[in-house]
Amino acid sequence: MSFVPLRMGYEKDWDMDKQHLSAGAGCIFPSFAFDVAFRQNLDWVSERQLSFALKFFFDPYGA
């Protein structure tokens, strides 16, 4: 589905000896989009991140 992006990822930080698992989803409309993402540290369970993004699309020429 082109208007509902889903994603999942894994990151291994060799320098800090950390592993992260992330997942996100969003929704895209003609004039705006929003996104939610979650990131979990697999080594330290208490380390988490939750993020939100809101995007607006401006078309000054009305195309």
Image: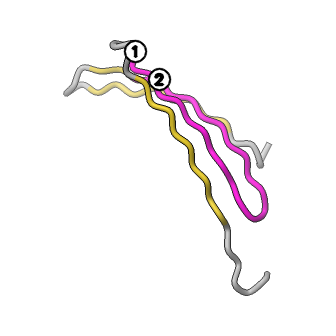
Mark seen at residue 21: 2
Residue 17 pos. (x, y %): 24, 20
Whether the magenta-drawn stretch holds residue 35 is answered as yes
Q: Quadrant of the C terminus?
A: bottom right
Residue 52 pos. (x, y %): 56, 43
Instruction: Tell me if residue 42 comes above or below residue 52 in the rendering.
Output: above
The residue most toward the left is 15
Q: CA distance from mark 2 to mark 1?
A: 7 Å
Left or right of residue 47: residue 16? left
Residue 53 pos. (x, y %): 57, 49
Q: Amino acid at mark 1?
A: Leu
**What residue is rendered at 34% in x and 25% in y?**
12
- Mark 1 lies on residue: 42
Mark sitting earlier along the chain (2/1): 2
Q: Amino acid at mark 2?
A: Leu
The residue most toward the bottom is 61
Left or right of residue 33: residue 18? left
Looking at the magenta stretch, what is its main secondary structure? strand
Hey, which quadrant is residue 23 in on the image? top right
Tell which of 47 and 26 is nearer to you: 47
Contact between marks 2 and 1 (CB within 8 A): the answer is yes
Whether the magenta-drawn stretch holds residue 56 is answered as no
Q: Quadrant of the N terminus?
A: top right
Hey, which quadrant is residue 40 in on the image? top left
Query: Which span is picked out in magenta?
Result: 20-42
Left or right of residue 63: residue 40? left
**What residue is rendered at 78% in x and 56% in y?**
29
- Density class for disc 2 (Cα within 10 Å; few <14, some 14-19, many ≥20) is some
Residue 3 pos. (x, y %): 77, 48
**What residue is rendered at 68% in x and 43% in y?**
26
**What residue is rendered at 36% in x and 20% in y?**
19
